[in-house]
Image (cartoon, rainbow, N blue to C red):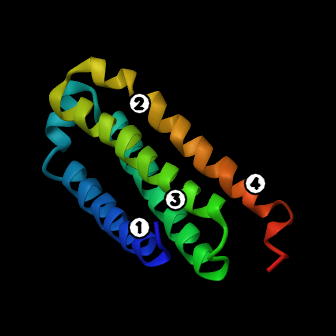
Amino acid sequence: MKTERILQVSAIFGALAVIFGAFGAHALEPFLVETGRLDTYETAVDYHFYHSLALLMVGILTRLYPDKKRLVLSAWFFVAGILIFSGSLYALCLSQISLLGAITPLGGLAFILGWVLLLLFSFGKVNQR
């Protein structure tokens, strides 16, 4: 994924996090409270937002270090994490199909791998051009 695409995807995901958060806080709140899923929905939005910002940071870093493959791979894992972790929680909250919660940890693993790749990038690579 190229720098421009990472930045574009982070902006889209950031906007969607705000939209989903507002939608959950207003239009969906009575339903989420009734079904006991408000906390789950808020967790999905929180992680969605955190990792949209992480993706933005990775996009900026790829502009500074365009030849660093670990950064691009980190971006892919953050995208996968948002789609799988937050996406499965959104779907769980709206559908009440509890089986969807079974795939959520895969999204969490993708988030962890994104952060680990960012860490690996930082070891000795940041100061070398």
Q: Nearer the viewer, mark 4 or mark 2?
A: 4
Q: What element carries label 4?
A: helix
Front of the two marks 3 and 1: 3
Between marks 4 and 1, how big is the CA–CA gap?
Answer: 21 Å
Q: Residue 6's spot in the image, x, y percent? A: 45, 69
Q: Which of marks 2 and 3 is nearer the N terminus?
A: 3
Q: Which residue is drawn at 48% across and 54% down?
A: 76
Image location (x, y in percent) of residue 72: 56, 62
* Foreground pick, 32 / 95: 95
Badge 2 amino acid: Thr
Q: Do the residues labelled 4 and 2 touch (CB within 8 Å)?
A: no
Give 114 or 1, whichever is nearer the viewer.
Answer: 1
Q: Which residue corresponds to mark 4? A: 120
* Amino acid at dot 4: Leu
N-term mark: 4 or 2: 2
Q: Earlier in the sequence, mark 1 or mark 2?
A: 1
Measure the alpha-carbon separation of dots 4 and 3: 13 Å
The type of residue carrying mark 3 is Ala
Of callouts 4 and 3, the N-terminal one? 3
Q: Which mark is residue 10?
A: 1
4 and 3 marks in contact (CB < 8 Å)? no
